[in-house]
Image (cartoon, grey):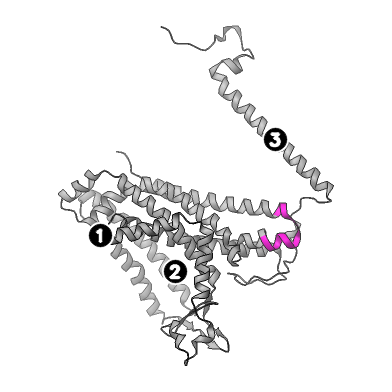
Amino acid sequence: MTAATDPDDSSGFKLSQLIYDTRYRAITIQVLTVLAVGWMAWELIGNLMSNLAARGKDVSFGFLLNPANYDITESLIPFSSTDTNLRATFVGLLNTLLVAFLGCILALIIGITAGVLRLSNNWIVAKLMTVYVEAFRNIPILLWIIAVFALLTEATPAPSAFRGDDPTSTMKLWDTVAITNRGTYIPRPIFEPGMGLVAIAFVLSIIGAIFFVRWSKKRFLETGKTLPNFWIALAIVFGVTALVFLVMGMPVSWSLPALTGFNFQGGLQINNPFLALWFALSLFTGAFIAEIVRGGILSVSKGQTEAAFALGMRPSKTMNLVILPQALRVIIPPIISQFLNLTKNSSLALAIGYVDLRGTIGGTTMNVTGRELECVILMMAIYLVISLIISSAMNLYNASVKLKER
């Protein structure tokens, strides 16, 4: 038998080759697909513009420079109703990034802890983690957000309950932290001259700790000798920072919350909508990460653990040096998806009154200006950029920790 070959080119190129010649067929199909998608997009955009023109509307983003005419209670930067819609959008974006960043960190901590504990030999601990994972995975996130918010507002006392003659004033911790139905009040640091040098020392100590960890790993590969990398790195970071902090005369003071009238004054107020959204997103996403971690650990051959134990390695060393490095290639890719889901799920903040990107450009600004199409396009573009940045950063980390073949 002889294998089929492509047509002979001696007679010149023929249009039929675009379909029957395997060298050109794939290109033909791709070109036709692009043309079809482009034609459909052109028709949809044309139909949209015609409908907008019939209603006397046009596509314009000039409204972003107009005054917002509404206030935002939770803002990381100064904002007033006279500021522009663009600044209001930026405030919402910062609120979204804040809850997404803190949520990813807390969800990762919860997920790794729960995933490892689900494999514990302690029956009670393993079953408790199973109940947590199954409960959060099988109930919609919106219900958990509302439930946590209701718990924070209904199960905590009003600020007036913190008077000395009220027995419910026990919700005040260490005389500096107050948990109320209006929010949690904590001390607020006031940075004084010299704190900039402390911050620089902190950054430099982190860089030094990273270099130490890399040197220690290289030393381990060359000599087989290990060091307590975590504790030494921790000592470098906090030891150097604390030393500079003391040398500069402790350049920080604290504004403590104090009950004045019917509410607390001073300190830093963390509103319940933010806390509810942060905790709910972290617990919900942490349940999925726990299963990812558990599956990644179980994907490593049991013989790897037995070989490590045969060499006299302790369980903690076996997990850190043998199991986790091999499990990371299975764990990290789905964790990226969970971080993206957490960021997008933060748009449900509107249900409890937390003003994020969805609440500004996709909520009040859209309702006030009547620019539905422009607001939705902007919101979609911003979420797309955020997701691409998170995905790219995690992919770079994944590439740096994956196993290298020799």
Say which amino acid is labelled 2: Ile
Q: Quadrant of residue 202?
A: bottom left
- Mark 2 or mark 3, which is nearer to you? 3
Residue stretch in magenta:
363-374
Q: In the rendered view of the protein, which quadrant contains the C terminus? A: top left
Q: Residue at x 70, y 35 (%)?
A: 40
Q: Residue 382 placed where, x, y %?
A: 61, 54
For marks 1 and 3, give the one nearer the viewer: 1
Sequence order check: which comes first, mark 1 or mark 3?
3
Q: Is residue 43 left or right of residue 225?
A: right
Q: Position of residue 291 (x, y in %)?
A: 38, 52
- Which residue is under mark 1? 122
Tag shown at residue 200: 2
Q: CA distance from mark 2 to mark 1?
A: 45 Å
Report the quarter where the N terminus lies: top left
Choose top left, top right, bottom left or bottom right for residue 51.
top right
Spatial separation of the CA atoms under disc 2 and disc 3: 54 Å
Counting from the top left corner in percent of width and height, residue 101 is at: 49, 61
Point out the tag, 2 or 3, that comes first from the N-terminus: 3
Which residue is depicted at the point 32% across and 56% down? Answer: 118
Q: Which mark is residue 383?
A: none
Give the vertical position of 160 relative to 12 (above or below). Answer: below
Between discs 2 and 1, the one toward the N terminus: 1
Question: Label 1 amino acid?
Answer: Asn
For label 3, the SS is helix
Q: How many marks?
A: 3
- Which residue is at the front of the view, 324 or 298? 298
Q: In what element is the residue under mark 2?
A: helix
Amino acid type indicated by mark 3? Met
Q: Say which residue label 3 marks.
A: 40
